[in-house]
Image (cartoon, rainbow, N blue to C red):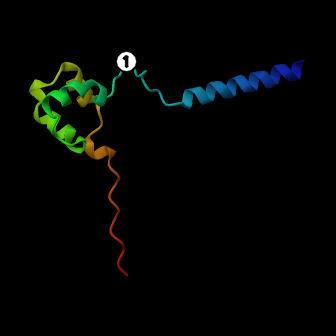
Amino acid sequence: MKAWMIAFTCLGFTLVAHAQDAPQTPPASQAPSARQACRADYQKLCSGVPHSAARDCLNSHKADLSTACQEALAKAPPKDATSTPEQPPPKSQ
């Protein structure tokens, strides 16, 4: 009986430790993505613009954007942060 108690206690501590290490992200219902928040604004203001240039188009119409879209764009990572880092030039010998 005592061995089971020790095993369950260790398991409990392990689960708590792993739960604290998990990344804390807000639920999707509380933090809509910029894509969700700006969908109507994109269709209204930038429908002829390719998706790859959508953020630039939306930023050029900041005054016309909905409040939700403005807030989502402000919280979204910069466009350059999502691109892959540039490879350093090869070392010359």
Residue labelled with disc 1: 30
**Residue 36: percent from left, percent from top:** 30, 26
Pick whichever, 3 or 63, lies toward us.
63
x, y percent for residue 33: 33, 28
Residue at image x 32%, y 69%?
Answer: 89
In the displayed structure, would residue 35 be above or below residue 52?
A: above
Left or right: residue 15 versus residue 85 is right
Q: Position of residue 25 (x, y in %)?
A: 44, 26
Secondary element type, mark 1: loop
Residue type, numbered disc 1:
Gln
Residue 93 found in image quarter: bottom left
Residue, far front: 48
Image quadrant assignment for residue 62:
top left
Q: Is residue 8 left or right of residue 58?
A: right
Q: Is residue 71 above or below residue 92?
A: above
Tell which residue pokes out farthest to the bottom in this image.
93
Residue at the image position 36 percent from the left and 74 percent from the top: 91
| Residue toward you, 93 or 63 | 63
Identify the image quadrant of residue 30. top left
Residue 42 coordinates in the image, percent (x, y) = 19, 30
| The N terminus: image quadrant | top right
Count of numbered labels shown in the rendering: 1
- The residue positioned 24% from the left and 44% from the top of the image is 52
Front one among 17 and 74: 74
Which residue lies most toward the right here? 1
Badge 1 local density, few (<14 within 10 Å), some, or many (20+)?
A: few
